[in-house]
Image (tube, grey):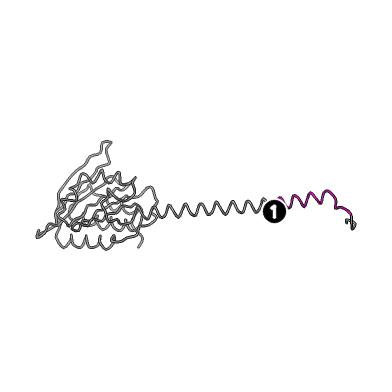
């Protein structure tokens, strides 16, 4: 015990000082941890906002919207298709690039006014050789089939806000939908939204332009959206 009026032992004084310093350091560390967590939260929020902006449906062509990295590859493929101006004001351009498949494909299909059916062009990229090889074939599509396809695409994509689609592998998908002077477009990768879109298009293409060079169900199964 310490007698009244006497000074506490030096050991007690240093223990108190160490306690004060430790408490101060603890508070500083808490503040730093909170700041780091807040910064990480803000960065994640900004990244998600960017991803949503890039993957949403845009009121513009693909050259003017979407993820710049994916868009570079998409646009190089789309130039092998008829341009938007040749879709007679009612058409679709679509591209899909399965990361683990043996082929990629793009198509353009349109319905000319008073035509008996829709007409399209399919471009398939064979990835089984060191030198890329493109093949082209024309196809036709009954008016009812075309109308049902673009109605589904419009329903799925119009005003779609995007999502935080940040995977690296997958199956990049892009579309351009032409309705008169209006052009909507979008591109994405692993999200269920684009998974549903690509399966809808692929199922129609298999019937209208069949061939062994099209992606198989196995190519798409991994990326099929959850039901």
Classify 80 as above or below 142: above
- Span highlighted in magenta in the image: 6-22
* Residue 132 pos. (x, y %): 25, 39
In screen coordinates, is 194 left or right of 149? right
- Quadrant where the N terminus sits is bottom right
Q: Which residue is drawn at 16% across and 63% down?
A: 144
- Quadrant where the C terminus sits is bottom left
Residue 17 falls inside the magenta stretch: yes
In screen coordinates, is 80 left or right of 169? left
Q: Which of 221 and 53 is in front in this view?
A: 53
Q: Residue at x 37, y 55 (%)?
A: 52
Q: Which of 73 and 227 is in front in this view?
A: 73
* Residue 162 pos. (x, y %): 35, 57
Q: Nearer the viewer, residue 39 or 96?
A: 39
In screen coordinates, is 51 left or right of 148? right
**Considering the numbered disc 1 on the image, is that residue within a helix, a strand or a loop?**
helix
Residue 18 falls inside the magenta stretch: yes
Which of the 4 quarters of the picture holds residue 221?
Answer: bottom left
- The residue tagged 1 is 23
Q: Most extreme residue toward the top, as rendered?
A: 130
How many numbered markers are drawn? Answer: 1
* Residue 12 pos. (x, y %): 81, 51
């Amino acid at each position: 015990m310490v007698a009244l009026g006497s000074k506490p032992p030096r050991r007690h004084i240093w223990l108190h000082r160490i306690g004060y310093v430790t408490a101060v350091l603890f508070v500083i560390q808490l503040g730093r941890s909170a700041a780091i967590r807040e910064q990480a939260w803000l960065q994640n929020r900004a990244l998600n906002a960017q991803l949503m902006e890039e993957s949403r449906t845009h009121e513009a062509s693909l050259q003017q919207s979407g993820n710049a990295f994916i868009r570079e590859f998409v646009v190089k493929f789309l130039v092998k298709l008829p341009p938007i101006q040749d879709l007679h004001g009612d058409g679709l351009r679509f591209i899909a690039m399965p990361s683990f498949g043996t082929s990629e494909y793009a198509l353009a299909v349109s319905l000319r006014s008073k035509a008996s059916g829709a007409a399209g062009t399919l471009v398939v990229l064979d990835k089984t050789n060191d030198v890329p090889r493109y093949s082209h074939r024309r196809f036709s599509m009954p008016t009812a089939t075309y109308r049902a396809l673009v109605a589904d695409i419009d329903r799925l994509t119009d005003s779609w806000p995007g999502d935080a689609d940040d995977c690296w592998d997958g199956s990049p998908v892009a579309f351009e939908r032409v309705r008169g002077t209006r052009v909507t477009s979008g591109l994405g990768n692993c999200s269920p939204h684009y998974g549903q879109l690509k399966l809808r298009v692929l199922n129609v293409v298999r019937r209208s332009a069949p061939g062994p060079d099209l992606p198989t169900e196995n190519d798409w199964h991994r990326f099929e959206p959850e039901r």
